[in-house]
Amino acid sequence: MLEDATRTQFAAVGWKARLLCVDAIEWAASASSQHYDLCVTTLFLHHFQSEALAILLAAVAARAQAFIACEPHRGHLSRIGGHLLWFLGVNDVTREDGVTSVAAGFADQELTALWPRAPSWQLQEYFAWPFTHCFVARRVGGSPADDAM
C-alpha cells in the first residue's frame, strides 16, 4: 500500500509514485517497455538465489534510471543482532526469520558482481551500521535503451 501522504511527498519533488504488485521474476521476464526514474527495495533481494537475482537486477537495469536496495548485512555484528531479537520482545517466527535473513544477506560487493556491466552505471555497495547492506545504482549518462545497444 502506498499512503496518500507518501504520494504527495513524491509529487512535491516532481515524481509520480507508482506501486507495482507483481511477481518479480514474471516482471523481469516480461517484455515491458515501462521505464522508471527510481526503483527501491528493502529486505527483498536476499530471498532470491544468485541466478534469479541476476535476472531480476538485469531487468531493473534495463528499465530504471536508479535503483536502491537495503538488505540484511551478512556479517558478525548482524549475526549477533539476529540472535538478540528476543530483547525486543518479538515472537519465535520473527526471531528465526531474522537469523535466516542475515545468513541469506549480502556482504562485500556481491550485488555489484550480479549487476549488468555497462559504462553508464555508477555503483555503490556498502555496509550501513548496524545491520544493513546497501546497494545504489545510478545511471550517469544515457537511458535504458542505450545499454541495450
Image (spheres, rainbow, N blue to C red):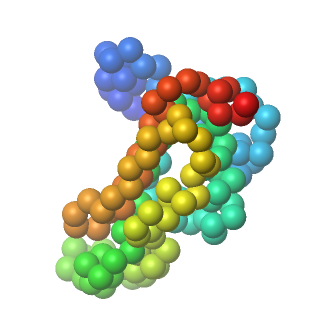
Q: Residue furthest front?
A: 119
53 left or right, relative to 91: right
Q: Residue at x 36, y 23 (%)?
A: 10
Q: Nearer the viewer, residue 124 or 23?
A: 124
Q: Position of residue 33 (x, y in %)?
A: 72, 26
Q: Is residue 111 above or below residue 10?
A: below
59 left or right, relative to 45: right
Report if residue 133 is visible in the image.
yes
Q: Position of residue 72 (x, y in %)?
A: 39, 66
Report if residue 40 is visible in the image.
no
Q: Residue at x 63, y 67 (%)?
A: 50
Q: Position of residue 119 (x, y in %)?
A: 55, 38
Q: Position of residue 113 (x, y in %)?
A: 54, 60
Q: Nearer the viewer, residue 40 or 23?
A: 40
47 left or right, relative to 134: right
Q: Quadrant of residue 28?
A: top right
Q: How many numbered circles are shown?
A: 0
Q: Nearer the viewer, residue 28 or 21?
A: 28
Q: Residue at x 60, y 47 (%)?
A: 117
Q: Residue at x 35, y 29 (%)?
A: 6
Q: Quadrant of the C terminus?
A: top right
Q: Is residue 111 above or below residue 119?
A: below
